[in-house]
Image: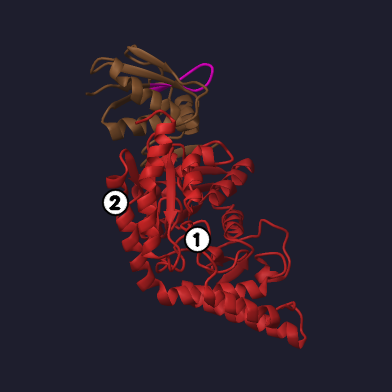
Chain colours: A red, B brown
Amino acid sequence: MAYLDAASTEPLHPAARDALLAAIDAGWADPARLYGTARRAQMLLERARAEVAELIGARPDEVSFTSSGTQAVHLGVLGTLAGRRRAGTRLVAGAVEHSSVLHAGEVHERAGGEVELVGVSRTGRVDAGAFAEAVARPGTALACLQTANHEVGTLQPVEEAARACREAGVPLLVDAAQSAGRMPLPEGWSVLTASAHKWGGPAGVGVLAVRKGVRWRSPLPEDERERRRVPGFENVPAIVAAVAALRARAEEAETESRRLSALVDRIRAEVPLLVPDVEVVGAPVLRLPHIVTFSCMYVEGEALLTELDKAGFAVSSGSSCTASTLRPSHVLEAMGVLTHGNVRVSLPRGVSEDDIDRFLAVLPDIVRRIRSSLGVH
Amino acid sequence: MWRRRTGGGARRSPEAAQAAERAEPAAPVRPAEPPALTIDALGRKCPIPIIMLAERINQVATGGVVAVLADDPAAFTDVPAWCRLKSHEHVGSYELPQGGWSIHVRRNY
């Protein structure tokens, strides 16, 4: 099978596998205790923290490990809103943020807060001017912006957003889940979140970094773990493996990203030539190196995924028929692009060019067959 | 759901559109021009409403308006997107009392 769904989860990096196996033996004890094995676990944990801090441009005491990227976002959003309650109750976010940001926003609204979503262009890029205006309005407690979109790969104007936030004195949460380990991280964030399984680490590890001086109060019951930011026993072996993967990715990112980006360019250029009535969505240049999304008119996304799976390709879709909610992806809706017949191809590290050749070879006939089964010729 | 939505906004979600209509009663809620053809796609999931529209748009004269009645939330985004890709004109989307929309499309060629 050709795995082309790296944006859902990246296969475990070999460096993470080695580190995980070693750390399961060396780092299983409770890092909060004082005997030898516990101190060893604590040393592994603190070394991992220092390395992540260096890789993301933070201080070690600003970094906490969470149980997922989603939990990092939930704690980052709700904790900063709680810490900033005196400054205001408005949350500003891009309309195409990950659902974890939007879900945290719903909790905030139910508690009486306000949420303002800033619209995007046809390519999915947040309107930087409108974002700056929204942030500058009195009563803004927090602004959230992803580094890049998880469904269409479009990069967001984080630098402009950071400048606007700095001028308005509003903290900026940057969700780096899709770009960490693939591209250099932006500066200017107050809170940064990321997810290890997206960069080739194991599942169950997220990163939450809160800049010194940013007011933050835990929205959850607290315990002594992770500087009182994340309750619960740390998964030290998985954290060690996650950091090993991030370090390995950072070393190979430039070369591999260039290779993957060239393959994405090929798919972007060739799909519309091979398949009639297709719209490739997302920004063509200002984008992640590994994601390409297109929609095929007159085709059900679910049928497309099923047929591609039979042909040996794992991809995903933002079409409503593939979602449990029966609603199309909020990202495609906000962009105003076709939501049916949608396919997201996201390339894992090391994907072979042969796989892309084969994908481009089987796709036209699959689309033709599905269309003719619906009476479209 | 969401209180406000600003800037950019290639298209608005059904909820946002409904919220905006509540907030801005001045917005047109009725079509100015009666459709020459009405396609009933209520209860049909995308891509069926689009397929029905593509099949039948040539039944009206150039410049004529087709109304697609649909209640799949995907159609709210997909009919205007189809118009853009096929160079027809999305005239407007009007809420139906029973739920869903009457989505008006002008045949341009």
Q: Earlier in the sequence, mark 2 or mark 1?
A: 1
Q: Which residue is mark 2?
A: A270
In the rendered view, would you say B53 is above or below A139?
above
- The residue positioned 30% from the left and 46% from the top of the image is A274
- The residue positioned 63% from the left and 64% from the top of the image is A204
The amino acid type, in three-letter code, at marker 1 is: Ala
The amino acid type, in three-letter code, at marker 2 is: Glu
Q: Chain of mark 1?
A: A
Provide the secondary structure element on which disc 1 rests: loop
Nearer the observer, A91 or A363 = A363
State which mark lies toward you, 2 or 1. Answer: 2
In the rendered view, would you say A114 is above or below A159?
above
Query: Is residue A268 at all visible to an observer of this figure?
Result: yes
Provide the secondary structure element on which disc 2 rests: helix
Q: Which residues are magenta?
A: B92-103
Residue B69: x and y, percent? 44, 19
Q: Which residue is mark 1?
A: A177
